[in-house]
Amino acid sequence: MFKFILFLQNEWVGTIAAFVLLASISTGCSFGIRQEAIPSQTPLIITATFPATLTPQPSETPPPPSPQPMAPRATPVEGTTSTQINVRAEPSIASSVLGIIPANTKVEITGKDPGENWWQINYPEGSGGKGWVTAQYITTEDKSEIPAIGGNEADLNTGNVAIVQQQLNIRSGPGTDFNSLGTLNPQDVVNLTGKDSNGAWLQIDFAVGPEGKGWINAAFVQTEGVENLPIITEAGLIVGTETPTGIPFTPTPTVMPAWADNDSPTNPIANVIFDPAGTYALIYNGDVSAPDGDAEDWIQFTPFSENILLEVSCKGSYVQIELIQMGQKLEPTSIHCRTQHVVRVQPSKPVQVHVSAIPDGTLNYSSYTLNIKTLP
């Protein structure tokens, strides 16, 4: 049995009552009628125990969704340069240089590469107002607040890029006997332009290399589509893409004099200030040659502890290394390749590292790496 509750305006009560009485006789249903005085503008409201049939409303174009609030941008983390550094377009030494930032300059860090070797900073001259700097030479106390970006976002499927898996040298030709032009770090992204005939070495864009190119060992990078890269001969000619089935091409190493960098004791090629909250180590790759080319390099660092560990490695001819502080040579007075030494220094006083080629009448070329670490 259905039950209705009707709220009626006064002037319709008589008519409606007659209708309800007639319905009661014909259906056997019972109804309760309640009369209420309500304002005339109040609409008729009927509440029933079965679903009401709704009259479809004309369709209309729904209004556009309300714009979602943008997520707040992460607040940049403040950092300070411990030496003069290059600002690059991408997190890689192979990337083009956008500018130079002096030592002891405040920077705003907005991101880092997955390997935490590079910081992205606000830099108006860069694309999108950003640039990349080497993390090793930036002192900051809030590293955990820096979001990871770049590096592994590269599209490897194009066959035109590679991600570096470990530190490796950029060389002037496809082989370890060619001159070292610089060093790449893990997660650096490089643009590929070619390969040698065996596919063991990859040519990359490298702005400061001969004709803007350099070579890296394919075993230490992650990439796809290498088979589609052109084969580059020693003369720089493109000879196809498929690896020939005949005798493999063997490059002939060409020893060239080291490039002159015009550094001096008063103008070192690198000047790093060690800091217990940030920079506590220095890795420098360089080259010297004699009698032609750049015969010596000057590197400077300022320690904060009394002892440092100096490790030297080199390829090619031997080099001689001296450490000088306040005009005095430190012990040991002569250091050569493939050696490791603990050196006592005065904290907060600059130390100069003098690297020189050893002439013997022929062209002696050496690529060397200095690894200087702070000891407790």
Image (spheres, grey):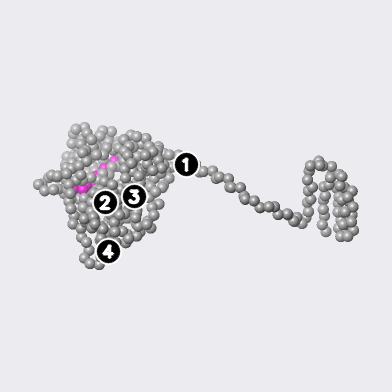
Cα distance, mark 3 to mark 1? 25 Å
Q: Quadrant of the N terminus?
A: bottom right
Cα distance, mark 2 to mark 1? 37 Å
Q: Mark 1: which secondary structure?
A: loop
Residue designated by label 3? 188
Does residue 335 belong to the magenta stretch? no
Cα distance, mark 4 to mark 3? 27 Å
Q: Nearer the viewer, mark 2 or mark 3?
A: 2
Residue designated by label 4? 243
Residue at the bottom extreme of this rendering:
245
Q: Nearer the viewer, residue 8 or 318?
A: 8
Which stretch did the figure color magenta?
366-374
Residue designated by label 2? 214
Residue 211 place in picture, x, y as percent: 25, 49
Amino acid at dot 1? Arg
Q: Nearer the viewer, residue 264 or 193?
A: 193
Viewer can see residue 88? yes
Cα distance, mark 2 to mark 4? 20 Å
Image-based side of 63 in relation to 346, left or right: right
**Could you tell which of marks 2 and 3 lies nearer the N-terminus?**
3
Q: Mark 2: which secondary structure?
A: strand
Cα distance, mark 2 to mark 3? 14 Å
Amino acid at dot 3? Asp
